[in-house]
Amino acid sequence: MAATTTNDESTSQTKVTPKRDNNELTKKKQTPKESRKPMNMSDIYSADSPKSEKRKKSSTIAADDHDISPKTKKRRTLNARNESDDEDDDEPKLRVSKSQNRKRAAILDSDEEETENARMDVDVTPISKNRIKKDTKTKANNSTKTSRKKKAAESEDEEVLYNDGSEEQSDQNESEPEEYDDDDDEDQTKTPKRRTTTLNKTKRPPKHANDSNFTHLSLEFLKDGHRRDANRRLHTDPNYDPRTLYVPEEYLNSVTPALRQWWIMKMEYFDTILFFKVGKFYELYNMDAVTCVPELNLTMMKGDLAHCGFPEKAYSKFADILVSKGYKVARVEQTETPNMVKERLEQQTGRKSKFDKTVRREICQITTPGTKTFNTLDNDNVFRESSYLLCVVEVPITGNKMTPWEFGICFVDTTIAQFYIGQFEDDRYLSRLQTLLAQYQPAQILCEKNKLSEKTKKVLTLTHAKIEYLIPNKELYETTKTLDILRDDTYFKDEKGNLQWPDAFQHVFNEGDQQGLHIRSNFQLSIRALGGILWYLQHCLVDKELLSMRKFSIFQPPDENIELREISTFKQQNMVLDATTLYNLEILSNSRGGKENSLLYTCDRCSTHFGKRLLSRWLSAPLCNVNEINERLNAIDALRDKTDLCNKVRDKLKIIPDLERLFCRIHSLGHRPLDTEHPENRAILYEDITYSKRKIQDFLAALTGLKVANEIVQIFAKHNDLSTASSLLNAIIYQNDENKNKNFPNLDELLDYYTKAFSHAQARTEGKIIPTTGVCRQYDDALKEISDNEKALNDYLSKQKKILKNHDIKYVHVQKIRYAMEVSESACRNLDDDYELMSSRKGFKR
């Protein structure tokens, strides 16, 4: 290695560059890099390629270097770094140990590569800084045996390299492999060497350089003036659909089979970042990679194809980061294994193209800011604030100056599957709509395209929520179509297939209408808004798991049906706090949009997550009914005299997890297997054991929470004076009388059943539930049948050993053939036609 000193007007720095030849040095001048600015989507698809700051080079490269021909081609992968690396240079760097013999995923060009990909894994372990440092003198002496010939322009790239583990063929137009010499291959076969990590002492943003040379930036159908949607409408057309993209067929036929799959999905989800599964890695290509490298702090791989990726286990972390920044993420899973591909090709008739030999992939879920759910791949169950998905339908009212607009609304908290529907008239200031937006702050808003007034658009824009426009009738369903879909599908059907509408729909349908054929006039627009929510949940592939919960409520503006009477006869339940009041008084958030020092922040001493959500609703619509206020005060007075009881109950409440969201998650995971058409059931996941354990932990956490809640009820039941002092405290105590439906239910029998049904410790360790004897009759019968069959097979094997006079006969399982007898060739000479030859190996027949 040789040291080269570069001087600037203000600073001077010393750099170490690889020695290209025995006597020649490579020198480069470096200019300070400006801080990276956020990249807009318009920059990615603009007609002119993004401007990239290029360093001025002054170097001479020996002619002999150009004669070096690569013998082995390997690929560079992502830089696995902690987020704290940018803050502290002294933190140990992360790298992948070569001794683990892990393999990096690549674009699959054939079946054999797919087979190799299926065995890929990665193990990121921290190493000390001393292990990264290398003696520069030793490297200079052994420069002829250096494993990587780096280009001068990339000598300062900060990245960690993973070992491919095998030679791969790569499209030269899409990905340029690294170069290795024969000497390095020989050294690796003799004594494995730890692959060095190329790190700089000076921290800089992660590499996404060479932007102007990426292949996708030269594609005409992506540039301004040429970009079209799936219906070939130019992007300047008022009816242009930004969610889709037109890709010419000739280009699809020119790319590799895996990239063809990626482009076909991108045609339907152009505004969505695709996490494209390749083996055990999620890969990002083209414009998605350019977006995610700075956002996720990943490292761009080498080559003209913009490409980066991360392991499957990191999905939850990276998806949450992107969604919280307003992006939409689609999880693309492999739905076939290499063996399944071979079986499909054997059954397929006619000519087989290279695209038929590719593993099939499907989009399993799309996550947006308004459709966050607790997924199987999520590795945490932390408390998150409610993020609502809101759909607004607006109809002008002619001739009415007081209330010139009527709105139909539907919004849902996807984390707990709670739906709200409502319809109301609004004044010229849109007071009710603004109050709704302040009380239930949406993360994403759906509107009818070309139907909103400018004033409504302005109000919705002020929320800073992501707004999407739906095409009328096609994406935002009409009222009758919405009800037909809800009625005919399995959303509201029980186990026997009977239709059971949610209780809230009794207010929507005419009296006595059990089939939902006639809707009341004051709910026409709200059902249309529900149609928009329904389509979007279908689009994100989470419709059935959310709607099947049947948790619907009727939204009613706080100031609706207020009758002005004398103060003594005032019967309004809640006080009306409009959007201006909530903002000026800083009820839910401060003037800067945060939570700190707001009234909710100051009053929030809740021990449970669902208690925090209830307190937020109480503060946004405080009580003004005298009787209700006195009931709460009576409960407070009764509890103030029992400090020890309150401390004991508070400690138990802190143990209870977020039951609302756990119930929704357990329901969705249990409901998904019933939906045989959902692609999630066909997904090939490589961390199945981890996910199974996670499901078990969620289920056990829910049981523990219910058990603690039941204990709290029993504690209150021992204090009879509390039930008499307050009706609210009396309501949480179980009573087996005519009011039992209004009080807390008795969970003793249910909890006792699940305590004895299976071993909780075994389920938590092994990731599977094994019922104990006597719990499930069908399971016990199946075990008995298996035992009887195994006994019969063992008896038959013993009989054959005596007949053939060979005690070495045993059962073997070969692919689909189970319990085949393996007999030595010497014992098979006198076999009659009663035996059928299934397979053989050296010295034995089966």
Image (tube, grey):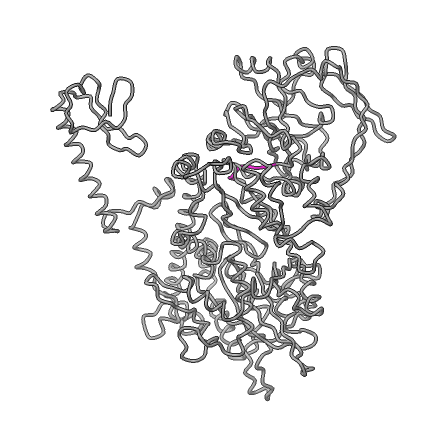
The quarter holding residue 790 reads: top left
The front one of 351 and 470 is 351
Position in image of residue 192 (x %, y %): 54, 17
Is residue 363 in the magenta section?
no
Residue drawn 64% across and 40% down? 286
Q: Which residues are magenta?
A: 308-313
With 844 as the anchor, is 43 left or right in this view?
Answer: right
Residue drawn 68% across and 45% down? 222
Position in image of residue 152 (x %, y %): 73, 23
The front one of 210 and 175 is 175
Give the number of marks.
Answer: 0
Secondary structure mostly seen in the magenta stretch: strand
- In the rendered image, the residue lying farthest to the right is 9
Is residue 312 in the magenta section?
yes
The front one of 204 and 300 is 300
Q: Quadrant of the N terminus?
A: top right
Position in image of residue 729 (x %, y %): 43, 69
- In the rendered image, the residue lying farthest to the bottom is 566
Q: In the picture shown, does residue 352 fall above or below 674?
A: above
The quarter holding residue 406 reads: bottom right
